[in-house]
Amino acid sequence: MNGRTAPIRPRSRPLAGPLCPSERASLKNCTMSNDRALNEALQAAGAVVGETAFGPDVLHFGDTAGEYSALTAAAGLVDLSARTRVELRGDDRAAFLHNLCTNEIRKLPPGAGCEAFLADARGHLLFHVFVHCRPDSLLLETVPGQEERLLAHLDRYLIREKVELAGRGEATAELLVAGPQAAGLLNKVADAPLPVERLANVELKLAGRAALVASIDLTQPGGFLVICDRADADAIWRALVEAGVRPCGQ
């Protein structure tokens, strides 16, 4: 509101939007990715789409038992691009977020991360987020469909701080690589070492495309989030599949 150093960029629409009639007629041949090339890769892998709690998304690739086994005993690959990503920039970003959440953000160094709950002025918990500290920004990541609410909540408390808020859902894609073989297979397409500590992140290239890779335990310890420009998601997805990572549904 008053004193904002830069206007909030236009809110992007939720990635998991309604299916068009032709997609509803053939769920097996559609996906929720906004990137046409990645969409084609998911279709080629046999993606089956259906309703989830957050809207239509890839449910499976024809073998739920095998996909579960990949995520828990080998290496699985899941398109999580529908999840919410909001970025904070500006000199006051750490202090601003610190005052609104339950974790120590001010001492978080670049390359580190944490979990946090965001609360309102009365202490009511509103959001659970993963915070990824980058050299020039803080990237918040949480469940799908929360971009509008999260941006509005942060904007409500933004007065004179030097902070810029931006929804990153339209511009970026997000992949999960999980399972005990995830690190080894991800290393095949990475040009630098992967993060080791939980929620640590590094910026590197996968298959020649820039990406933020963060250590995560959404399924079990040893998983990784890959966040990249949406235009690069298809190349990274295909490289990971060629390296031996199995496509999996939600």
Image: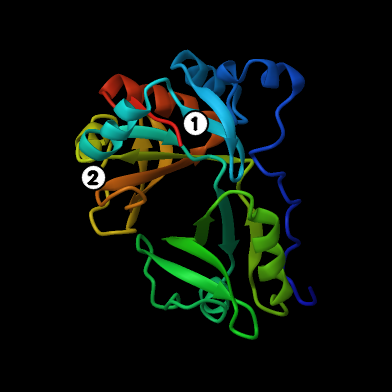
Q: Is residue 161 above or below residue 178?
A: below
User: Residue 221 versus residue 242: which sits nearer the camera?
Assistant: 221
Secondary structure under badge 2?
loop
Task: Give the x, y percent position of residue 130.
Answer: 45, 61
Is residue 190 visible in this depiction of the protein?
A: no
Give the mark nearer the N terminus: 1 vs 2: 1
Task: Give the x, y percent position of residue 202.
Answer: 34, 51
Quarter of the view holding residue 45 = top left
Task: Give the x, y percent position of residue 203.
Answer: 38, 47
Q: Is residue 147 left or right of residue 70?
A: right
Q: Which residue is mark 1?
A: 59
Q: Quick check: marks 1 and 2 in contact, CB under 8 Å?
A: no
Quarter of the image with the N terminus in it: bottom right
Dot 1: within a 10 Å radius of its alpha carbon, few (fewer than 14), some, or many (20 or more) residues? some
Q: Is residue 190 above or below residue 38?
A: below
Quarter of the view holding residue 62 = top left
Q: Amino acid at mark 1?
A: Leu
Q: Which residue is mark 2?
A: 193
